[in-house]
Amino acid sequence: GQFDRAQAVLGALNQGARDAFTRRTSSDAIRDALAEALRARGHQVDIDVGRSQFRCDLAIVGSSKRDYALAILLDNPAHVVAD
């Protein structure tokens, strides 16, 4: 139940975790346009959801307002790993 404290401890032990926890959302025109279109249809949409290096691009809040009903992952050329 002490999420912020847990993040502080993990961040102190691991530089990678600290970097992931403090990473800011980057600009993405397609993601932002999709989020706005969904919001225009009455959905509550969160962007860049997650606490690790892997984040969900869009998440639609469920009717209970306590969890997510749908997660949307987008293909992004910037995330492609070359062999």
Image (cartoon, rainbow, N blue to C red):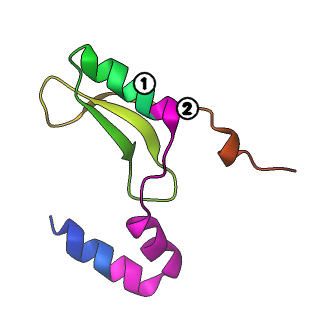
Q: Give the x, y percent position of residue 74.
A: 55, 32
* Furthest-top residue in this view: 41
Q: Give the x, y percent position of residue 61.
A: 23, 30
Q: Is residue 64 left or right of residue 56?
A: left
Q: What residue span does the magenta drawing correspond to?
A: 9-31
Lower position in the chain sequence, tag 2 or tag 1: 1
Q: Answer whether labels 2 and 1 touch (C-beta < 8 Å).
A: yes
Numbered mark located on residue 75 in the image: none
User: Which residue sits at x=42%, y=24%?
Assistant: 34
Q: Is residue 33 left or right of residue 45?
A: right
Q: Quadrant of the N terminus?
A: bottom left
Q: Is residue 73 visible?
A: no
Classify residue 22 by image quadrant.
bottom left
Vertical side of 42 occupied by 18: above or below = below
Q: Is residue 20 visible?
A: yes
Residue at image mark 1: 34
**Could you say which is closer to the camera, residue 83 or residue 79?**
79
User: Which residue sits at x=24%, y=21%?
Assistant: 43
- How many angstroms separate mark 2 from mark 1 (CA)? 10 Å
Q: Is residue 65 magenta?
A: no
Vertical side of 5 occupied by 48: above or below = above
